[in-house]
Amino acid sequence: MKNWHKRLSINICINSSLIALVLFLASGLNHKAYSALGGDLPPESVKVIPMTSEASVSTYIQGEKGKIAVNIMYPTMTRYDRGAPVAVIVPGNKRASGLSISSHTTQVGFCEVRFAFPGGGLKEFHTDGSWDERGVDSQKVLKEVLLFSCSKKPDINGKMLADLVPKKVDTKNVGILSWYEGGNITLVTLSKFAKDLEPIQSNLKWLAFSEPQVGALFFPSIMGTKRELVANPYYKQGSAATGRIWIDFSKLRFQDGVYRNSLVREKQKMTTPRGVLYFDDNENGSWQEETEFPIPYATAPNVHKQYYAPEVVSAIIRLKMFAPLPEPPKVEPVKKPEPAKSKMMLGLGKLTGKEPPPKPKIEEPKKAPEDRWPPTIARLHEVEEYFTERDGSLYIDSVVKSFPNTLIGIYASKVDLNEQQADHPNITYLYNLFLSAKPKWLRLNPDPTYAGFIADMNEGNFINNKPNQALESDKIEFHLEPEGLISDHVFMEALIAEMADRAAANNLKVPLGKVIRAYLNEARILGTMKQIPPTKTESSVAKPPEQASSTAASQTPSPSKTKIVKEVPRDSNLRDEEWDWPAEFDEK
């Protein structure tokens, strides 16, 4: 018993060492998990699919307010014998142009139609008009592009899409691929211009959404994006899946005269209005940029105001944040004693039989209560009008009714590019809204046979969701694709390939067992997955029509280098919430 303390010390040392070892291993695993969540993966962990060259031809189509710049990328081998199906690309990340990006749909045998919204494009090849934050003018541009893509509208030279591309094109199998918040303008346009788009109702076979941000609370997102680094703690987990998003606004406060991301603003010379709307965690009335969650807002061209979601502005009104100050209580003046009436006055009153008329009281005009609503924050009627023009979630029922045979697919992975909430509210919200509208076909993520075939991997690596099944927020993780195996655009290739094939074959069978159309491009056929690294040819960058026509005539990209002009900056105010486009889509 004399050495008990020594044995205890030895045991403590051993236990401490074991605990340290366990913590070290755990921290290593957690670090790996964190790296995966943050997208910080070594290059070799993401499988690279070999790609063939991507040739293109450019043209203009006539819009209501001028010419619309359109670029068509076409495959070396079409997906079907009758031609290549058409994918109209709607860019996300608040871009005014999609001309300089590629979704690489040509790699699975599609024609890819890219275009610029008003005021966007390249210096020598752009769309006329001014950027309207994807308002009515932008919607009209998308409408015209859809008509052109379905061969219901010619370009300015009277040529249809099939006349411009040196490959067969199946313009009766057309779909829209919307990236991120691009799903909003897609849904708004299909609903508002349903009558104008009646000629393409049978041609529009599918809609694809990549990690969508549809709804006023998702663009810009109030839930917490990579800009905020943390998720919004005042959002009630699971509420988005019900279609009624619940957020506790009780600590909502506004501080005027300050900027969010002031260092970035100074560097980029931003001109957005002063003032930050935020959740005052410590209730000290002062915004702490490092710890307190700010509410993002949208902007309108040439309007120096912050446009918050209608739900946010309604909360401001309920909390009476900018209500007029109460008027001070009125103090009644002390009445002076009236002087005694003289006998002469009394006698005069008797003679006339009337009392002398009282002096009229002069009432002071009432002052209107002071309006304390900041001029830099749009009021409720303004934001309702703004988001009615831009919130796609308001039009889902109308779209499904107008396009009853259109197949709908949504892609989502375990790590969303923008949203950070654990229940992936942007996915469950949109999916269940679509489900309640009862579309012909609704699926979250592609059939694993397609994901495995296009990625050249075992289909067991991918998720198998049943079409038209309800999504529960607490089980959403089981329905999401794994992160770090293949790039997002490969998942989108699988999603649109499945829907186009199902539409072409009129086959909605589940499970499939194998792909309907086993399409392989030349790089896959030649077995060059390891020998030829993926390259992005300069032909994938949109060129002015006069340059692109020679490419179409020769059917092969020109070996000479073409001078690529820079994209014109948007003619609108930059915002604190400006997002970066994923590097994998940028042209080098």
Image: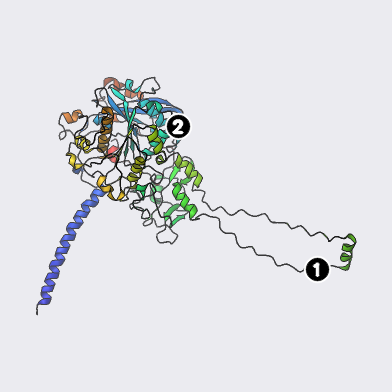
Inspect this view and state whether residue 425 appears.
Answer: yes
Q: Nearer the viewer, mark 1 or mark 2?
A: 1
Q: Secondary structure at mark 1?
A: loop
Neighbours of disc 1 within 10 Å: few (<14), some (14-19), many (20+)? few
Check disc 1 and give the amino acid type. Answer: Pro
Tell me residue 176's x, y (percent). Answer: 34, 33
**Closer-to-camera residue (553/270):** 553
Q: In which image quadrant can residue 344 be found?
A: bottom right
- Which residue, given by chain and number where applicable, does mark 1 sit on? 339
In the picture, residue 539 is in which quadrant?
A: top left
Badge 2 amino acid: Gly
Residue count near mark 2 (Cα–Cα under 10 Å), binned few <14, some 14–19, many ≥20: some
Residue 368 has which mark?
Answer: none
Q: Position of residue 393 (x, y in %)?
A: 40, 41
Please report the residue visible at 83 percent of the width from the left and 60 percent of the height from the top.
Answer: 356
**In the rendered structure, which disc, 1 or 2, sits on the residue that comes first in sequence?**
2
Q: Position of residue 100 (x, y in %)?
A: 33, 33
Identify the coloring: rainbow
Q: Which type of secondary structure does the marked residue at label 2 adopt?
A: loop
| Left or right: 478 in relation to 60 | left
**Which quadrant, please, contains the N terminus?**
bottom left
Residue where numbered disc 2 is placed: 129
Tell how many labels: 2
Q: Name the quadrant of the C terminus.
A: top left
x, y percentage for residue 287? 42, 57
Q: Nearer the viewer, residue 221 or 586?
A: 221
User: In this rendering, is residue 126 above or below 317?
Assistant: above
